[in-house]
Image: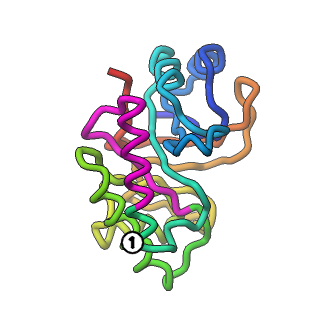
Amino acid sequence: MEGIDCATPLNARTARALADAGVEFVCRYLVPARYAWKRLTGDEAEYITGAGMQIGSVFETTANRAAAGAAAGQADGVAAYKEAQLICQPKDTAIYFAVDYDAQPADYDAIEAYLRAAEEQIPGYRVGVYGSYTVVEEMAHRGAAWHFWQTYAWSGGKKSKAANIYQHKNDVSMAGIGVDLNKSFGNEGFWYVE
């Protein structure tokens, strides 16, 4: 499937325009109200699914937050769970947690601890990770997540066989907003408003 992720909240018009352009899924930020500029709301979720697209939820406050380890993962898991409940995200779907920087092997233990701590705080949901080829490969090897979203950034042209979603181009304009382009391959943990 073809999809996008973006920081800009969608309205009914932009959601319809994206769907008309062939977009099948939209990944949006499941973050607290203090990040209102990029926060997915219940109304927006209805616009997206009303236009026939699926939703992917991703939690990110700062690019390298996962490097802070278990304590950060616990706090972020609590925040993500609260937001998922507010927007009525169905259970048995994914919440991706972003590793949005060029993580190095020295960071992997902290990232694993972050993901495991976050998962404990999102009962009924499945933890996913967004990151580079090496982050996806390493977290898949460690069994630290259920779903994997790889970015081409910091990936050296490699694509992980574990990736459920692959982000292949950034900073494209569609429907008058800036988006990143993605492809998905199944088992993404996407959802619709029930």
Let me know if residue 190 is in the magenta part.
no
Locate residue 37, reporting x and y percent. 67, 38
Decide if residue 6 is on the left or right side of residue 59.
right
Q: Residue 28 falls in which quadrant of the image?
A: top right
Which element carries disc 1, helix, strand or loop? Answer: helix
Q: Looking at the image, can residue 29 be seen?
A: yes
Residue at which label 1 appears: 70
Residue 16 screen position, x and y as percent: 59, 15
Q: Look at 42% across and 60% down and name the residue there.
A: 75
Task: Kindly identify the residue that appears in the image at 43 percent across and 77 percent down.
Answer: 110
Which of 87/187 is in front?
87
Q: Position of residue 185 (x, y in %)?
A: 40, 43
Instruction: Decide if residue 29 is on the left or right side of residue 7.
Output: left
Task: Please give the name of the residue rendered at 38% of the width and 55% of the height, measured from the top-left corner.
Answer: 77
| Front one among 66 and 154 | 66
Q: Quadrant of residue 140?
A: bottom left
Residue 85 on the magenta segment: yes
Q: Which residues are magenta?
A: 75-99
Q: Nearer the viewer, residue 158 or 175?
A: 175
Check the image and report above or below for 111 versus 180. below
Q: Amino acid at mark 1?
A: Ala
Looking at the rendering, in which quadrant would you find the C terminus? top left
Residue 176 placement (x, y as % from top left): 76, 26
